[in-house]
Image (cartoon, rainbow, N blue to C red):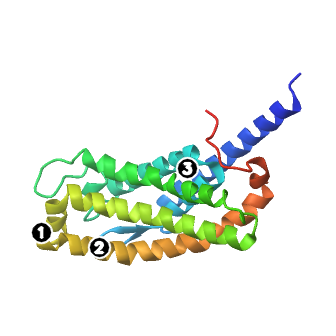
């Protein structure tokens, strides 16, 4: 006969997988509706980072990284099927300006920053859970806001930074700007897209996480942050 502890562990695993499946479904729903990716003249602004951030905080870095990978996959599909000016930086199937083929570096830009979006919020929230006043609701809300902002900026800064590093000339050609203006142009996009995306994440993340943390009794199950079981 299985011990109560084993049954409880299995129940938590099922619960965790159900939440993971729900957030994965939300990611793809947002991807293929106007709600998830907003087509702008120079880049696609997104709210897809929000489910990844929330999933990272609730489920831990491994499942958060999985959600980040699904974020990257959805971006790859979207940029391949509905290409924009900068889609060559997210899909190796879209030719780089000036070339007749795509670049494998697009996979790095598409996936690596998004996977890290599923890790960095958990790291920030794990730090909060070691603080003496961690049970204070105000402290918890602030930590969730900071975690969300860090996750959002991880996405925007790393994606745009990688584009500037790997595809500087091609990006300048695609946008019709001088090569020497690429850095300033990218910084402008980081500010124009990154700040609103961070604000959205900072508002939505505490509103979703606080009730779920209490409803699922996540703080009681894991009094201190630890690595997820294999």
Q: Is residue 9 left or right of residue 45?
A: right
Up-down relation of residue 222 to residue 198 (above or below): above
- Mark 3 or 1, nearer chain start: 3
Q: Which residue is mark 1?
A: 179
> In the figure, residue 177 lies in which quadrant?
bottom left
> In the figure, residue 146 lies in which quadrant?
bottom right
User: Which type of secondary structure does the marked residue at label 1 adopt?
Assistant: helix
Q: Is residue 156 left or right of residue 120?
A: left
Q: Tell which residue pokes out farthest to the front in this image.
A: 132
Q: Label 1 crowding class (10 Å Cα cut-off): few <14, some 14-19, many 20+?
A: some
Q: Which residue is mark 2?
A: 187
Location of residue 198 in the rendering, given as x and y in whole percent from the top left corner = 49, 72
- Mark 1 or 2, nearer chain start: 1
Q: Label 2 crowding class (10 Å Cα cut-off): few <14, some 14-19, many 20+?
A: some
**In the depicted view, which residue is nearer to us: 76 or 15?**
15
Quadrant showing the N terminus: top right
Q: CA distance from mark 3 to mark 1?
A: 36 Å
Q: CA distance from mark 2 to mark 3?
A: 27 Å
User: Which type of secondary structure does the marked residue at label 3 adopt?
Assistant: helix
- Mark 2 or 3, nearer chain start: 3
At x 21%, y 48%, the residue is: 102
């Amino acid at each position: 006969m299985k011990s109560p502890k084993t049954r409880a562990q299995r129940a938590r695993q099922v619960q965790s997988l159900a939440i993971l499946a729900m957030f994965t479904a939300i990611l793809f729903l947002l991807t293929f509706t106007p709600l998830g990716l907003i087509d702008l003249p120079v880049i696609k602004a997104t709210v897809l980072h929000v489910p990844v951030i929330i999933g990272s905080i609730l489920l831990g870095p491994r499942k958060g990284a999985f959600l980040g990978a699904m974020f990257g996959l959805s971006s790859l599909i979207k940029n391949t099927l509905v290409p924009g000016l900068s889609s060559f930086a997210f899909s190796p199937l879209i030719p780089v300006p000036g070339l007749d083929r795509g670049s494998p570096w697009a996979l790095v830009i598409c996936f690596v920053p998004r996977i890290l979006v599923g890790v960095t919020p958990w790291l920030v929230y794990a730090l909060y859970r070691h603080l003496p006043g961690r049970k204070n609701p105000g402290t918890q809300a602030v930590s969730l806001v900071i975690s969300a902002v860090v996750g959002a900026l991880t996405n925007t800064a790393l994606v745009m930074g990688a584009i500037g590093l790997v595809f500087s000339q091609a990006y300048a050609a695609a946008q019709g700007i001088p090569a020497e203006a690429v850095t300033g142009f990218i910084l402008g996009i980081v500010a124009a897209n990154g700040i609103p995306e961070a604000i959205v994440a900072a508002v939505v993340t505490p509103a979703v996480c606080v009730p779920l943390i209490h409803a699922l009794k996540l703080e009681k199950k894991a009094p201190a942050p630890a690595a997820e079981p294999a």
